[in-house]
Amino acid sequence: DADVTQTPRNRITKTGKRIMLECSQTKGHDRMYWYRQDPGLGLRLIYYSFDVKDINKGEISDGYSVSRQAQAKFSLSLESAIPNQTALYFCATSEAGTGVAGELFFGEGSRLTVL
Amino acid sequence: AQSVTQLDSQVPVFEEAPVELRCNYSSSVSVYLFWYVQYPNQGLQLLLKYLSGSTLVKGINGFEAEFNKSQTSFHLRKPSVHISDTAEYFCAVIANTNAGKSTFGDGTTLTVKP
């Protein structure tokens, strides 16, 4: 089983609909992230959480919200989806602590299409 | 804040040829450096990382990278590529302060042709 699991893997929805992407991890990491990947733009950080009570905006948080339900669960919501939110979304985790490099462990991605 | 520039968006090469994927970064603090690889329809996985010490680091699948502090570069190399190396490669940096977030380059698509 994958250490970082994302659901759904693929979703097609219509403009204005509410969408939730879920992420769960078995790595025991405190830190979790949501990234968005668009062709030619690399990965851009949407939100991140360094522990259950810590939620922070990334560089492109507008139009998104998150919830950290437990150490192992971090969900991303689009309250009212729009076509330019069509993208591949990745959840990632990392360790915390002095001397830890911050290497990211990724899920397999959730492809979202907004019509 | 940090930034990463991957100098080539696409690199086509023939099988068994050498390849270099270029990455430059800027940062006001010391950083850790990473290369990640994304195979088609998969998530990203770590290829190699530089934390400290020897500037030449070796990773999986025969890849290596050299950290050059004066040039602020971290170029990825492989002496002989295989068809299976076809993928997208991302360079990333993170401040070594334990409070940082990774910053990614835009990616380089490596296409290995027979």
Image (cartoon, grey):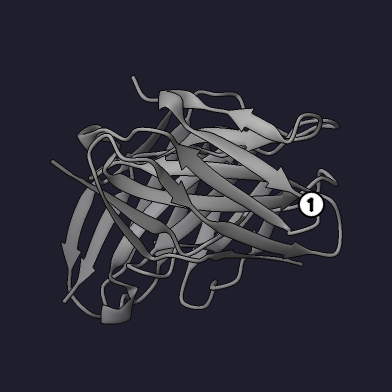
Q: Residue furthest top?
A: A1
Evaluate whether residue A51 shows in this view.
no
* Dot 1: chain letter: B
Q: In this view, does B61 lie above or below A96?
A: above
Location of residue A23 by image quarter: top left
Evaluate whether residue B45 shows in this view.
yes
**Residue drawn 31% across the image and 65% down it:** A87
Question: What amino acid is found at the position of numbered circle 1 in the picture?
Answer: Lys
Q: Which of B104 and A29 is in front in this view?
A: B104
Query: Does residue B43 appear left or right of residue B74 in this picture?
Result: left
Residue under numbered circle 1: B69
Image location of residue B109, percent across then percent down: 33, 56
Image location of residue B61, percent across then percent down: 40, 25
Number of numbered labels in the structure image: 1
Q: Quadrant of the image for the C terminus of chain A?
A: bottom left
**Residue drawn 60% across the image and 71% down it:** A59
Image location of residue B103, percent across then percent down: 62, 58
Q: Which of A60 and B86 is in front in this view?
A: B86
Q: In this view, does A25 lie above or below B112?
A: above
Q: Residue furthest front?
A: B17
**Residue drawn 43% across the image and 65% down it:** B8
Image location of residue A16, percent across then percent down: 27, 80
**SS type, badge 1:** loop
Query: Does residue B53 appear left or right of residue B81 in this picture?
Result: right
Location of residue A37 by image quarter: bottom left
**Residue drawn 16% across the image and 63% down it:** A12
Q: Quadrant of the image for the N terminus of chain A?
A: top left
